[in-house]
Image (cartoon, rainbow, N blue to C red):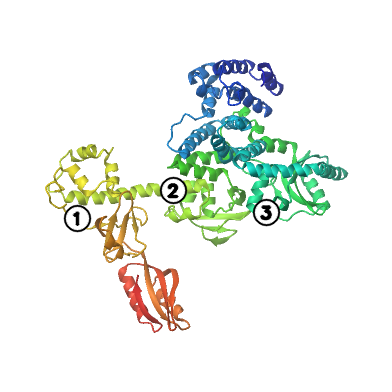
C-alpha cells in the first residue's frame, strides 16, 4: 500500500501545481474514517481506496480526482457524511464522491432492478462529471484484482458478470483498452474457469517453444529502420478472453486460430504510420478484409491507429497496429489521456456523445430490464461508419438499419422517417447498412414511430425512443377507449351521478385520480359491477338478486389504432363493416372478434362488450381461402382480379392439393366488408376458381 508521502509525491511528479494539502487531508480523513475495517483478504480496508488512487496516478489525473478516489467509500462504509466531505474538500470532490459511491444499500426486489438502479445513478453522475467514470473504473479494476479473496463463489460470479456486462464495455467506449482487457481477463477467469485454464496452458506452451514474439518483433523493427522509419516495436499474445471469444464466434479450436500474436509499432508522426504500413505490406502479404484505417476515420471513442494482419514466414498470421506516441497514449488510457478536466470540460463532449445517448435512454426506460437492454446495446457491438449526404460521419453497431441511423442523427428525424436512400438508391427502412454507406433519411411530419420498427431497430437509442412514443400513444388511446366504456357504464345507472360520486368512488377503489380510474376501466382492472357500485351503491343490483344492467349501445372504436388500445383477432380477421364484439380480460387490450368467430363459443368466463366500427373506419386485413383448378395461370388470374379491385395481397400460402384442385389461403388488405364481398364475388365468377370462402 502506498504511504501518504509516496502518493503525494506521485501526483506532484506530473502535476507540480497540485493541491498537496487537499491530498494530505483526504488521506488522513479516509484513514481515520475506515479505522479498523478489514477487507475479505484480511488487509485493512483503507488499502483499497489508496490502491485505487495509485491506479489513477498512473494515468496522471488531477488532484480532485485523486482525492475522490481516496474518499470514494467513506460515505457508504463509514460514519462520514456528504456534508463533511463538502465542507472539507469542496463541491467538486463532494459531488464526485457521491457519484462514485457504491450503491449496494439500494433495496430492490430483483437482481435486474438492483443492477438497473446502480447503472441509472452512476450514468447520471458520469454525465455531470466524466471523472466519476474514471474513478469508478479504477475502483472496479482493483476490486477485480482482489476478487479471489471473496469466499462466496456466487458473489464472485455476480461481480464478474457485472464487470463483463457493464464496466469493461464502459472502459472500451472511452478508449481505456488496458483497463478493459484486464477486467475481461479477471472476469473470464471467474465466469469460465475451465476455459480460462485451458487457454492459459496453451499460451504457456507456446512460450516454451522459444520467444517467437521477440524474433518477429525484431525483424519488423529491422525492416522499418532499413527504410528510414524509426519505430518502437512491442509484441504480445492476445489475452485469454479475446482468444476464447474468437473461438466461440468462429466455432473453431485453439489450434485453428492464426492471429494469436499482436504487435504494435509506435512511430514519430502520422505520415510515418502510412510509410510503415507500405513497407510492411510490400514485405509480407496482408490478409484481405483485415485492414482498418482508424486514423482517417477514428472510432467513436476517439481511438486512432492503423490495423493490418499479415502472413509471416508463410504460415503465421500476425496482427500489427501502427500509431504515433500520442495515439498510443490515447489508445491505452483513452479519455484519461485528454486531461479534459484541466480545461474545464468535465461534461461529455461531442466525442463522447454516446454518454448523452445513455442519459436519454435513462429518461425513457420504463422497466429495469428495458434500461439494461438499451444501455448494453449502446455500449456493446462492433461499429460501422455511415455518412449523411453532407458528409457527416456517424458510428453505428453492425446490423444497424436506416431507422437506427435516423435516430443517431436526431430523435425528430427518427420519429418522422418514412423511407431511406442508401448510396442514392431507395431501400426499405429494415435494410442493413454496410460500412461506408451514405444514408439519406426521407421524412414526413405526418409520420410517427411504428410498432413494427422494433423488429429491426437494434440501437438502444432508437428502441428507447420508439417505445417511449408507443407508450404515449397507448396511454392516450387507452384513456380514450376507457372514457367511452366509462360513459356507457354510467348511462346504465338508474339515476344521474351526484357531484361527489367520482371522488367517493376513487376512495372506495383506492385510485389516485380520474385518469387512473379510466385506465382501470379500459384494462378491466375493475369490473362493470364494481364501478357501478362505487359510483352509486346498490345500482348493480347484485345484492338484491337482480341481473347487472346490460349494455345499451355499442361502443365505437373509430380513430383508435389496432394493436394499441385494442387488438384484432388473428383467427377471424374482422374488418370494418363486420358485426363485432370485444372480449375484456384483466390488464389486457380488448380483443375484437367477428360475431361468428368460433373463439366466442368458449368465452363464457370473459366479459363481452358490444363494439361498433364507427362511420370513418376504413381498412383492414381479411383472410380468404381460394380453391383453384390445377391449371397453368390460375393463380395469376386470381392475382389480376384482386389487383383490379384495388385490394393488396399481404401474404399467400399454399394449403392443400389433390389431382384437379389446389387450395390457397390469401391475406388481403381491403377497405371494408362490402369491398371484400365484391372481391369474393368477382373471384367466384372466374373460370379458374372453384370456390372462395372467408376464413
**Rendered residue at 73%/43% (across/down):** 203
Q: Nearer the viewer, residue 602 or 675?
A: 602
Q: Nearer the viewer, residue 226 or 218?
A: 218
Q: How many marks?
A: 3
Which mark, by number, is residue 467? 2
Give the alpha-carbon distance from disc 3 to disc 1, as whole Å. Answer: 66 Å
Q: Are marks 3 and 1 in contact (CB under 8 Å)?
A: no
> Is 34 placed left or right of 241 in the picture?
left
Give the mark nearest the N terminus, 2 or 3: 3
From this view, report whether residue 650 is shown above or below residue 485: below
Residue behind mark 3: 252
Residue behind mark 1: 551
From this view, report whether residue 44 is shown above or below residue 524: above
Q: Residues within 10 Å of mark 3 (few under 14, many from 20)?
A: few
Q: Residues within 10 Å of mark 1 (few under 14, many from 20)?
A: some
> Is 197 placed left or right of 653 in the picture?
right
Q: Quadrant of residue 88?
A: top right
Give the alpha-carbon distance from disc 2 to disc 1, as whole Å. Answer: 35 Å
Give the mark nearest the N terminus, 3 or 1: 3
Amino acid at each position: 500500500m502506498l504511504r501518504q508521502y509516496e502518493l503525494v509525491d506521485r501526483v506532484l511528479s506530473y502535476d507540480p501545481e497540485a493541491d498537496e494539502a487537499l491530498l494530505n487531508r483526504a488521506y488522513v480523513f479516509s484513514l481515520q474514517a475506515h479505522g479498523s475495517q478489514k477487507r475479505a483478504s484480511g488487509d485493512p480496508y483503507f488499502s483499497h481506496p489508496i490502491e485505487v488512487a495509485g491506479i489513477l496516478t498512473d494515468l496522471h489525473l488531477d488532484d480532485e480526482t485523486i482525492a475522490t478516489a481516496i474518499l470514494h467509500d467513506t460515505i457508504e462504509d463509514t460514519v462520514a457524511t456528504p456534508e463533511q466531505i463538502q465542507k472539507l474538500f469542496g463541491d467538486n470532490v463532494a459531488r464526485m464522491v457521491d457519484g462514485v459511491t457504491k450503491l449496494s444499500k439500494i433495496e430492490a426486489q430483483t437482481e435486474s432492478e438492483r443492477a438497473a438502479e446502480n447503472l441509472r445513478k452512476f450514468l447520471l453522475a458520469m454525465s455531470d462529471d466524466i471523472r466519476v467514470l474514471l474513478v469508478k473504473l479504477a475502483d472496479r479494476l482493483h476490486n477485480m484484482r482482489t476478487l479471489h479473496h471473496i469466499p462466496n463463489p456466487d458473489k464472485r460470479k455476480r461481480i464478474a458478470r457485472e464487470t463483463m456486462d457493464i464496466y469493461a464495455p464502459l472502459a472500451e467506449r472511452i478508449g481505456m483498452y488496458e483497463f478493459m482487457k484486464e477486467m475481461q481477463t479477471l472476469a473470464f477467469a471467474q465466469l469460465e474457469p475451465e476455459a480460462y485454464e485451458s487457454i492459459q496452458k496453451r499460451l504457456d506452451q507456446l512460450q516454451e517453444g522459444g520467444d517467437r514474439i521477440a524474433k518477429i518483433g525484431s525483424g519488423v523493427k529491422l525492416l522499418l529502420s532499413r527504410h528510414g522509419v524509426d519505430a518502437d516495436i512491442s509484441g504480445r499474445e492476445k489475452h485469454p478472453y479475446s482468444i476464447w471469444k474468437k473461438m466461440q464466434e468462429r466455432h473453431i479450436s485453439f489450434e485453428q486460430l492464426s492471429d494469436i500474436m499482436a504487435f504494435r509499432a509506435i512511430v514519430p508522426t502520422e505520415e510515418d504510420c502510412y510509410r510503415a504500413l507500405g513497407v510492411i505490406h510490400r514485405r509480407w502479404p496482408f490478409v484481405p478484409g483485415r485492414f482498418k484505417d482508424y486514423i482517417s476515420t477514428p472510432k467513436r471513442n476517439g481511438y486512432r491507429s492503423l490495423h493490418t494482419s499479415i502472413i509471416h514466414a508463410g504460415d503465421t498470421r500476425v496482427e500489427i497496429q501502427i500509431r504515433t506516441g500520442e495515439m498510443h497514449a490515447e489508445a491505452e488510457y483513452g479519455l484519461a489521456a485528454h486531461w479534459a478536466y484541466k480545461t474545464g470540460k468535465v461534461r461529455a463532449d461531442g466525442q463522447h456523445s454516446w454518454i448523452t445517448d445513455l442519459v436519454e435512454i435513462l429518461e425513457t426506460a420504463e422497466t429495469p430490464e428495458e434500461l439494461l437492454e438499451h444501455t448494453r446495446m449502446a455500449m456493446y457491438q462492433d461499429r460501422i461508419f455511415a455518412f449523411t449526404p453532407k458528409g457527416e460521419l456517424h458510428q453505428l453497431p453492425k446490423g444497424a438499419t436506416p431507422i437506427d441511423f435516423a435516430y443517431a442523427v436526431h430523435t425528430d428525424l427518427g420519429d418522422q422517417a418514412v423511407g431511406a436512400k442508401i448510396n442514392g438508391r431507395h431501400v426499405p427502412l429494415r435494410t442493413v447498412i454496410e460500412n461506408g454507406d451514405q444514408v439519406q433519411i426521407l421524412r414526413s411530419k405526418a409520420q410517427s414511430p411504428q410498432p413494427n420498427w422494433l423488429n429491426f431497430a437494434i440501437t438502444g437509442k432508437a428502441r428507447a425512443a420508439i417505445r417511449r412514443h408507443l407508450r404515449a400513444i397507448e396511454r392516450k388511446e387507452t384513456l380514450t377507449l376507457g372514457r367511452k366504456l366509462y360513459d356507457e357504464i354510467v348511462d346504465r345507472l338508474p339515476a344521474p351521478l351526484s357531484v361527489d360520486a367520482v371522488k367517493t368512488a376513487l376512495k372506495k377503489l383506492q385510485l389516485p385520480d380520474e385518469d387512473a380510474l379510466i385506465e382501470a376501466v379500459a384494462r378491466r382492472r375493475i369490473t362493470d359491477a364494481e364501478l357501478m357500485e362505487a359510483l352509486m351503491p346498490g345500482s348493480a343490483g347484485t345484492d338484491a338478486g337482480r341481473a347487472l344492467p346490460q349494455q345499451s349501445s355499442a361502443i365505437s372504436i373509430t380513430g383508435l389504432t389496432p394493436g394499441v388500445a385494442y387488438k384484432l383477432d388473428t383467427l377471424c380477421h374482422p374488418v370494418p363493416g363486420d358485426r363485432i364484439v370485444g372480449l375484456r380480460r384483466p390488464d389486457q387490450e380488448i380483443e375484437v372478434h367477428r360475431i361468428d368467430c368460433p373463439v366466442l363459443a368458449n368465452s363464457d368466463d370473459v366479459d363481452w362488450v358490444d363494439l361498433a366500427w364507427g362511420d370513418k373506419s376504413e381498412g383492414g386485413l381479411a383472410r380468404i381461402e381460394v380453391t383453384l383448378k390445377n391449371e397453368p395461370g390460375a393463380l395469376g388470374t386470381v392475382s389480376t382480379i384482386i389487383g383490379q379491385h384495388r385490394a393488396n395481397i399481404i401474404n399467400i400460402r399454399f394449403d392443400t392439393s389433390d389431382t384437379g384442385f389446389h387450395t390457397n389461403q390469401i391475406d388481403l388488405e381491403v377497405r371494408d366488408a362490402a369491398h371484400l364481398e365484391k372481391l369474393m364475388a368477382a373471384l367466384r365468377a372466374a373460370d379458374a376458381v372453384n370456390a372462395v370462402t372467408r376464413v
